[in-house]
């Protein structure tokens, strides 16, 4: 053991004695260095979803062996060209996203970004020639209430691992609509209509942008954000989300 690792081990021991902390999912002691809020074993339970998806909106297709365009994309193609989710909004993944969002453990943005990196690295069409990441914004008042934007926390981690710039406060939420999670599918589209705007469109002009959000449900938010970005001059918008409900 070098002096450095000895000092680190001693520091960890002191931290454990003074501030023992436990995994919010399984209750085990967080005793490995770098473990925060959720233990490594629980993070290891996160599994990418394998199976057919709509090649456009990335909707998980049940009961079909192959991917095909979903009805929604055939009838009304979205402004984004491609969206992919990492896993089903279920089990440990759902629990971790809820801890990030509602218990405000911003530090969980990092392991979720690492999970996205693992799941979506093979999706070449998502990353090719992408110039920047844009997090789906919260309205100013909601962000103040929560203390941070969970999508930005995830996008920041991905930006670091991918070497992509994060365009912050470029897409903004101008209308404080009720949270999508509180609405039925039919009302979600109306709820986000004209809720977003682009500030400083020169930053995205002619660029391929990847929108980043935590959960994909009906796709109404991604559709509306993409529409606004394309109208403001983005060459192409793609999107990624951590989980799909
Ligand atoms: Zn655990
Ligand atoms: Zn689709």
Image (cartoon, helix red, strand yellow):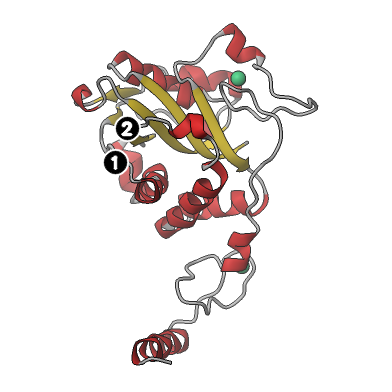
Decide: is 145 above or below 208. Answer: below
Q: Is residue 14 left or right of residue 85?
A: left
In this view, 168 is above or below 24? above
Residue at figure coordinates x 34%, y 87% from the top left: 4
Percent across and percent down for residue 115 are 53, 51
Can you say whether 69 is above or below 88 in the image? above
On the question of residue 102 being in view, the answer is no
Q: Secondary structure at mark 2?
A: loop
The residue at 66%/42% (across/down) is: 49
* Local crowd size for mark 1, using a 10 Å CA cut-off: few (<14), some (14–19), many (≥20): some
Residue 1: give x, y in percent of width and height.
Answer: 43, 92
| Extreme residue in the top direction | 75
Can you give x and y, in whole percent of width and height, for residue 204 in the image?
Answer: 26, 25
**Is the Cβ of the residue at disc 2 closer than 8 Å to that at disc 1?**
yes
Which quadrant of the picture is home to ligand 2? top right
Judging by the rendered image, the residue that carries numbered circle 2 is 131
Q: Quadrant of the C terminus?
A: top right
221 sits to left or right of 70: left
Report whether 166 appears left or right of 20: left
Which residue lies at the image location 42% right of the left edge and 31% below the top edge? Answer: 128
Kindly identify which numbered label has been placed on residue 211.
none
**Percent from the top left, x then y, of residue 205?**
25, 21
Determine crowd level at label 2: few under 14, some 14-19, many 20+ residues with C-alpha closer than 10 A. some
Location of mark 1 (residue)? 165
Camera-nearest residue between 7 and 201: 7
Taking the image as shown, residue 183 lies to the left or right of residue 226, namely: right
Q: Quadrant of residue 15?
A: bottom left
Of labels 2 and 1, earlier in sequence is 2
Task: Compare residues 236 and 171 and report the one nearer the observer.
Answer: 236
Seen at 19% across and 23% down, the residue is 202
């Amino acid at each position: 053991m070098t002096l450095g690792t000895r000092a680190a081990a001693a520091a960890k021991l002191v931290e454990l004695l003074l501030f023992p902390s436990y995994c919010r999912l399984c209750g085990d002691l967080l005793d490995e260095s770098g473990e925060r809020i959720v233990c490594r074993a629980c993070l290891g339970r996160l599994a990418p979803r394998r199976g057919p998806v709509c090649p456009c909106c990335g909707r998980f297709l049940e009961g079909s062996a192959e991917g095909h365009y979903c009805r929604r994309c055939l009838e009304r193609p979205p402004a984004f060209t491609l969206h992919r989710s990492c896993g089903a909004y279920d089990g440990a993944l759902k629990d971790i996203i809820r801890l990030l969002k509602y218990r405000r453990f911003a530090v969980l943005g990092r392991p979720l970004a690492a999970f996205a990196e693992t799941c979506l690295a093979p999706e070449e069409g998502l990353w090719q020639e992408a110039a920047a990441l844009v997090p789906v914004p919260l309205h100013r008042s909601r962000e103040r209430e929560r203390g941070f934007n969970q999508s930005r926390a995830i996008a920041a981690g991905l930006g670091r691992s991918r070497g992509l710039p994060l365009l912050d406060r470029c897409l903004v939420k101008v209308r404080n609509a009720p949270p999508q999670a509180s609405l039925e599918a039919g009302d979600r589209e109306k709820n986000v209509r004209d809720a977003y705007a682009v500030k400083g469109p020169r930053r995205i002009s002619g660029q391929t942008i990847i929108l980043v959000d935590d959960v994909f449900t009906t796709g109404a938010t991604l559709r509306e954000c993409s529409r606004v970005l394309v109208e403001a001059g983005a060459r192409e918008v793609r999107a990624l989300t951590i989980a799909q409900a």
